[in-house]
DNA sequence: GGTTCCGCTGAGAGCGCTCTCGCGTCTATG
DNA sequence: CATAGACGCGAGAGCGCTCTCAGCGGAACC
């Protein structure tokens, strides 16, 4: 099957119009008579013509692609496959992109290669970029070069962002543990270089301060095995532990396993709260009480802001993180009222990382 | 900060060479003196120049991007976020792409829009496309237009493919259930339009035939809720059920939940085997015995074949699916020898879908 | 010294598209 | 009836790059 490459020239010739008119029809631009428009449309349909994206991008300066930029901590690119988080981000972006015939490009780099990768992406003119876990400094530089960027999560002040209330949510989670009676609460955090992990850590510290708890915290690397190892260590160091807050569900799942393996019970001996409300949360036994991060919605909002060009430098959209009470915090937790929220939950946290 | 767009012209001028020479240096083409080469390289580094991808693609006809093409069943694009499968595919592709400065484009469409999307992707010349769950007919058409495509999973005969032994693995899973004593075994399958689901269904049917089982099968849509609903129905219809094979771990997790909610025990009353060995498998209680699909490795292999241009029409690479025995099949299963495998496990299955 | 060959370089013609600009036609206006 | 404006259309100049081809100087050979 010889499938000769069609160009707009072919279409124009076949339809008996100029290249310019054909282009106008293809782009739904005004200033074409209905007659010619249908004629061109038919030829396009008959021949199955598709404009060449590269040529279009070059000529127009616009791009048909939106970039997702993810920086992996410590070169841990494999986290991308292990964490449900990222596929949920992609799902959200794709949902917002559906029907726009804008394509999604996925760029993942380790922190070491991050500046290089960001420069490359910034240079290629795109519909925009959704930045995931890009440090504030790099995000700022990126945004300075290519104005079309939105950060998923807290970042530099003048970079537009979609932010979950990480800090607030972590505070709420620990507050819940406290209210069901836990007094010796530990936190298993994500890696330092992860911006979300930092926000959750801040919330933990605030809870420690306000509730008069000891600051017991370890890093679980956002992985199940890390959560298992962290909980094992915590259990050994603090035999009186009665509550664990994990900064993601995968780590919480590992922690539950470690607790069980150590011969303790969840939630009777130790209550556990996870974070994300990912697919695993409901699969764990007992099912995890967790903080529902609206990842898909946030990613979709960031994408839409980019497509609509609505993302001015200080544009910001905050997403509440709701508590999903399941069994890992015991039967009592469900009966408790949700923690009291201020009307503008975020203002209280302004200035926090 | 005024960040004027650099072109190769700027580089050439600044380095005192022609555009052609600058281009040669940028592409590591031979025929440039070491002197000029270093001069150009330094200017590029100093100015932080990045060639424009669109212009490069247009001029060379090559593309710096590799496409991942996913067709979602029944318009169920949200499965992308709910199934760990897809992020593992992406992780595998990204791993193979690391260091090649080829970018990944993700294209997801519902079955209804599939022909349209495939045409668009086929038209834009790319480094190649990894086809996930594209029907054999569409894959064949796609491959006819753009020779650079590899299917992940069984497909049309002359489309290159990386195939897991789905059928064999499903057979092995059910055979395990049979060997630990299950006699009333049901299967929870994926949606018909999913090619992997079809392979697993074929293996189930073979097991039914060879082991003399009843053909009890329902569709669980590759989702946890679907698995829960399916198991609930199965339990009601077949009170004597003692084994369940689920075509993915998410459905298996749902099934375990349903069994527990129905007051039966896993594995004591009903043994369960999942598929994929995804992140949830280990989180479920009891942890799932499952078939480990080397998704990342397969995706990486497909990607490498594309990059190296090794994917001739009949190119094929088969991946064995190993059994991971955990507790959902009881303590006895671990003691059983793995099922006997023929030396070339796939040849026996040749001609199967 | 003349010829050949070879390695390095630059000029220039596109790649397929968009978009400005100007021309011609057609309708409202004074 | 002349003029202005609006509208539809085509010509043509790029977008930033690659790649062929011709030229040029120097080494090798007769």
Image (tube, coloured by chain):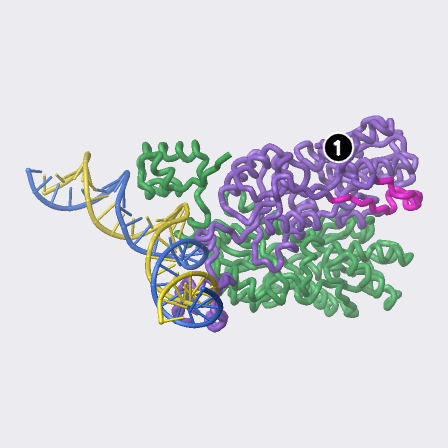
Chain colours: A purple, B green, C blue, D yellow
Q: Position of residue A132 (x, y in %)?
A: 64, 41
The residue positioned 39% from the left and 33% from the top of the image is B43
**Res. A205 visible in picture:** yes
Q: Position of residue A261 (x, y in %)?
A: 83, 39
Q: Quadrant of residue C3?
A: top left
Identify the residue position indicated by label 1 in the image: A201
Q: B330 or C3, which is in the foreground?
A: C3
Q: A161 or B69, which is in the foreground?
A: A161
Q: Position of residue B222 (x, y in %)?
A: 72, 59
The residue positioned 61% from the left and 64% from the top of the image is B348
**Res. B162 visible in picture:** no
Is residue A329 a member of the stretch shown in magenta? Answer: yes
The residue positioned 67% from the left and 49% from the top of the image is A301
Q: Is residue B131 left or right of residue B215?
A: left
Q: Quadrant of residue B233?
A: bottom right
- For the C terminus of chain B, the image quarter is bottom right
The residue positioned 87% from the left and 31% from the top of the image is A241
How many other residues sit within 10 Å of disc 1, few (<14), some (14-19) or many (≥20)?
Answer: many
Q: Chain of mark 1?
A: A
Q: Is residue B246 above or below residue A132?
A: below
Does dot 1 land on a helix, a strand or a loop?
helix
Q: B158 or C27, which is in the foreground?
A: C27
Q: Position of residue A293 (x, y in %)?
A: 75, 45
Is residue A214 a member of the stretch shown in magenta? Answer: no
Q: Which residues are magenta?
A: A319-341
Q: How many marks?
A: 1
């Amino acid at each position: 099957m010889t499938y000769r490459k069609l160009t707009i020239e072919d279409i124009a010739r076949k339809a008996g119009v100029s290249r310019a008119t054909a282009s106008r029809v293809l782009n739904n631009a005004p200033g074409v008579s209905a007659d010619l428009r249908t004629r061109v449309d038919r030829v396009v349909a008959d021949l199955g013509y598709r404009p060449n994206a590269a040529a279009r991008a070059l000529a127009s300066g616009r791009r048909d692609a939106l970039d997702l930029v993810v920086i992996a901590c410590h070169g841990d690119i494999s986290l991308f496959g292990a964490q449900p988080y990222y596929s949920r981000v992609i799902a959200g972006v794709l949902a917002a992109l559906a029907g726009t015939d804008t394509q999604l490009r996925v760029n993942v780099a380790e922190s070491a290669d991050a500046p290089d990768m960001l420069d490359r992406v910034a240079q290629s003119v795109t519909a925009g970029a959704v930045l995931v876990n890009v440090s504030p400094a790099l995000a700022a530089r990126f945004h300075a070069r290519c104005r079309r960027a939105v950060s998923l999560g807290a970042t530099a002040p003048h970079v537009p962002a979609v932010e979950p209330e990480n800090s607030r949510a972590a505070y709420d989670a620990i507050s819940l543990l406290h209210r069901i009676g836990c007094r010796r609460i530990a936190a298993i955090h994500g890696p330092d270089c992860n911006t979300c992990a930092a926000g959750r850590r801040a919330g933990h510290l605030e809870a420690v301060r306000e509730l008069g708890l000891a600051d017991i915290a370890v890093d679980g690397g956002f992985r199940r095995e890390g959560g298992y190892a962290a909980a094992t260590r915590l259990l050994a160091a603090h035999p009186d532990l009665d509550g664990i807050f994990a900064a993601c569900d995968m780590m919480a799942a590992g922690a539950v396993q470690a607790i069980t393996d150590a011969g303790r019970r969840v939630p009777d001996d130790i209550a556990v709260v996870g974070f994300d409300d990912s697919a695993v949360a409901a699969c764990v036994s007992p099912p995890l009480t967790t903080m529902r991060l609206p990842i898909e919605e946030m990613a979709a909002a960031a994408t839409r802001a980019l497509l609509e060009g609505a993302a001015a430098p200080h544009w910001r959209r905050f997403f509440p993180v709701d508590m999903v009470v399941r069994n890992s915090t015991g039967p009592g937790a469900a009966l408790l009222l949700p923690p009291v929220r201020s009307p503008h939950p975020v203002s209280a946290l302004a200035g926090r990382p």
